[in-house]
Amino acid sequence: MHIYFVRHGQSEANAKDIISNRTLNVHGLTDIGREQARAVAEQLTTRVENVIDVYASPLLRARQTGGIIAERLGLSSDHVLVTNALIERDPGIMEGKTDPQSWEVYMDLARLWREGDYCARLPEGESYHDVRARFMPFIDHIKHKHRDQDGAIVMVGHAGTYLMMLPLILANIDSSYNGRRELDNCQFVLAEQRGDDLVCVEWAGKPIL
């Protein structure tokens, strides 16, 4: 089994620099974001013969990206499964903010997590432990459910969640790796299941040895 961890296409929040991680039905894809989603969907058609399911974060931009991918892959809407496990981290009182000071505070939390302060959180928001508690059991479930299937899972989520959580589940990616890599809109990380492990074989178009 292979898993494609795809970041959503450009959203209205990306274009307008809005912190928008919890309001589910606003800030959908821009025209650029739709083009990005169509492009990655087309790329997947050349790489994957059997897509088992498409999972998406409940945020509108991720659901829209997942829908575009599923349609191009010939899957019905029943194969786009929405899960809170993939949602972006809760920014608490910073939700909806656009000013540079709020962005600085928001981004500084990621630094604290990288430095090991896993209990740190913004007021009314999530800690690293909170994100891990919803992400890890979901990945374990997927690995167990599909381990004997020959095909691919497509997950559509968010850069913040992926950069923090993927080093926990990919056997050949250490915790410092997320500070050296980015994941732009509609780029993906490709993982391959080998026994009980998930191994990263590609990150944003670059093979991982």
Image (cartoon, rainbow, N blue to C red):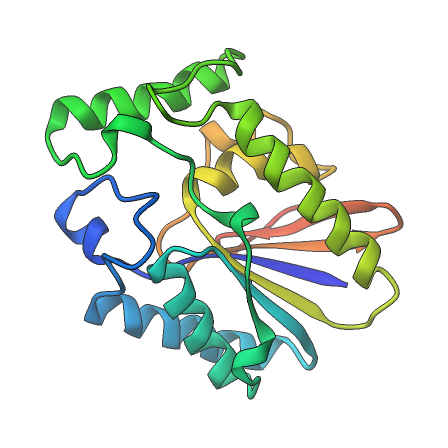
The percent position of residue 143, horizontal first and vertical second, equals 78, 53
Q: Residue at x 42, y 65 (%)?
A: 63
Residue 103 in sight: yes
Q: Quadrant of residue 150?
A: bottom right
Left or right: residue 13 versus residue 129 is: left
Q: Quadrant of residue 81?
A: bottom right
Closer-to-camera residue (38/86): 86
Q: Quadrant of residue 171?
A: top right
- Position of residue 149 relative to residue 165, above or below, is below
Q: Residue at x 56, y 46 (%)?
A: 85
The percent position of residue 141, horizontal first and vertical second, equals 76, 51
Closer-to-camera residue (137/70): 137
- Position of residue 118 relative to residue 138, above or below, is above
Closer-to-camera residue (75/184): 75
Q: Residue furthest front?
A: 124
Residue 176 in sight: no
Q: Residue at x 52, y 80 (%)?
A: 77
Q: Residue furthest left?
A: 99
